[in-house]
Structures are given as C-alpha cells and as structure tokens.
Image (cartoon, rainbow, N blue to C red):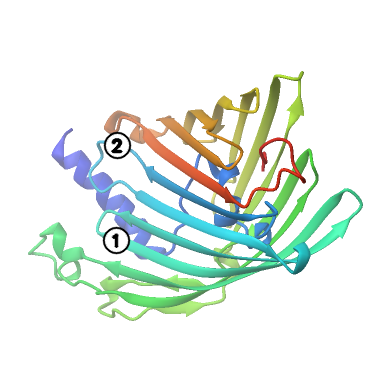
Amino acid sequence: MNIQKSFLILIGMLTCFVGTAQFDPNFTQYMFNEMALNPGYAGSRECLSGTLLYRQQWVGLDGAPSTLTGTVHSPLMGGKLGAGINFVNEKIGVSQRTGVSLNGAYRLALANATLSFGLQAGLVSLSENLGELNLQNDQQFMMNSGKRTAPNLGFGMYYSTKSWYGGLSIPRLIYNRLDVSTGSTEVQNSFNLDYFHYFVTGGGVISVNNAIKVRPNAMMKVVKGAPAQLDLNANVLFNDMIWAGLGYRSGDAINMMLGAYINKQLRIGYSYDYTLSMLQDYNTGSHEIMLGYDLNYSKDKMVSPRYF
C-alpha cells in the first residue's frame, strides 16, 4: 500500500474520531448480539445468555478499527424484568474506547408477544495517543490525552413474538467529546439531540419446510447530518443446525455469513465483508467472529434453538 495514501486515510479516520470522540461500531452479525444496541433486549432469550463478538475491519489498512464486545443478560422476577451488562473495547487509529454499562428492561406480556422498555447506564474510557503518529513539527499531534472517563446513558424498546421482532434504540444519549487539538484533555459531556444515533431493527423466521427456515433481518441507522445507513441480510437455516446467508450495507459493503448451532445452547458464527466504498483499494475486507451460549436451557419451553 502507498504509505502516503495510507497515512491520509488514517488521519481522516482520526479526524472523524477527534471531532466527536464518539462512534458506534458496525456489526454484520448484529442479529445475534441485539443487546449491544438495545437495552430493551435484556432478558428476551428467557435464560442466562452470553455473546462475544470480535470484528477486525478493513484488514490491511493501518489504523483500521478493531472491536471486541460482550453481553450477558437474563430475565428476572418470572420474566417481568430483564437485566444485563455490556462491554466494548474498540481501537481506531491511535484512539481507543472502552465501555461498560448495565442494562435493565421492564417487560410487558401481551397476547402472543412481549414488549420491553430498557435503560442503559455506564461509563466509557476515552484516550488519544497522538504521540504514536510521530509528527514532531505539529504541536497539536504531540499531546496524548491519557485515559479519560465519561458517563453514558441509553434507551431502547423491543417487541417480539415467536416469529418476528422489532426494536428501536438510542444507545448513546450523552455526547462525549475529547478534542486534544484545543489544548485540553478534559472530556466535554452534553445532551445534544443532533448527535443521537437511532437504530431501528427488525427480523423474523419463515419456515419453508421441516428442514429449511429463512431468517431475514434489517437494521437502519439514522443520525442527523448523514445519510441513513440500511443493513439488509438473510440467513437460510438447515435442520436447525447450520446457517448461511448474504447481506448488504448501504454505501459500505456486501457480506456473507456462516454459522452453526453446536447444540441448543452453543452457537458460533463467522462473517466476511467485501468493501464497496472508496477504501476498497486499500483493504482486503472485514472479518467477524461470534460466539454465543445460553445457560440452563429449558427443553420444556422450547424444542428448537432460539432464533432471536
């Protein structure tokens, strides 16, 4: 890769981060890790459930994002409440964000459906190690911020039946800004509607026959001042064991997914994104690995794996 072009791309990503100090990572397998986006999802799998997801984006591009996220959640009080915890660690260029949050959901049992309202509260650690750029002639890029901690709040709604689901969430209500170019390393926190990221998700399961099911999913991300981003995909599940699928993220990538239920408790998945944006010539795609486990799975309640 041309070093100058790689450097310019890295600076572009860094500038975006410094301007907001707040970013929401993309996940291709979001349908298996809904609680990372929506606190209303807590408790919806009707058991103690955990998911780990690792994403390496734009492989081959120096400073490209890498993300590790994990969630654990469970129903409480006979399913009337849900509770969980989220963890995320993301590095992009010389910027890093680590966050931990607690989720709580109030779940209403409706006729053949459940409607949940969730809240999220946590802390996020932000840092800018600009000294790694080794730009000795630019004072603004010689200052490291060190680690700074900021609060975060989120909100979400989640509606589900046995065959489909829908969700609406704002996972970050507080705008955290860390801009070392001003000469300050203090985090600026504000409640600003202009910076809300809205996530709308939906999907379901369609039985073709006893052996084949189709699972379509969609996610739309909306933020003021930018085009809405639409993520569409569909997986075909064979014998409730193995799935394969294709997807498209507007203005960004096409993807393929493979996965399997090792048993009714353990699931593992992999996805690959082929870049369609202007970064196409500078990377070999994005990889993502998902691992999920449901503890104390009840055979009395379900005869097949949970689909969402």
Secondary structure under tag 1 reads strand
Residues at marks 1 and 2 touching, judged by CB atoms closer than 8 Å: no
Residue found at the far right of this picture = 111
Residue found at the far left of this picture = 136
Q: Quadrant of residue 288?
A: top left
- Residue at 56% across / 76% down in the picture? 191
Residue 304: image x %, image y %? 70, 35
Q: CA distance from mark 1 to mark 2?
A: 17 Å
Secondary structure under tag 2 reads loop
Q: What's the residue type where badge 2 is placed?
A: Val
Which image quarter is the C terminus in? top right
The residue at which mark 1 appears reads as 95
Q: Earlier in the sequence, mark 1 or mark 2?
A: 2
- Residue at 20% across / 64% down in the picture? 130
Answer with left or right where residue 125 lies relative to residue 196: left
Considering only vertical position in the picture, is 290 above or below 205?
A: below
Say which of 46 and 89 sits in front. 46
Which image quarter is the N terminus in? top left
Answer with left or right where residue 83 lies relative to residue 250: right
Q: Is residue 21 visible?
A: no
The residue at which mark 2 appears reads as 59
Answer with left or right where residue 193 lies relative to residue 168: left
Residue 57: image x %, image y %? 36, 41
Say which of 137 and 245 sits in front. 245
Say which of 46 and 223 sits in front. 46
Q: What's the residue type where badge 1 is placed?
A: Ser
- Residue at 55% across / 29% down in the picture? 247
Q: Quadrant of residue 149?
A: bottom left
Residue 157: image x %, image y %? 72, 59
Q: Is residue 178 visible?
A: yes
Considering only vertical position in the picture, is 89 above or below 66?
A: below
Q: Quadrant of residue 99?
A: bottom left
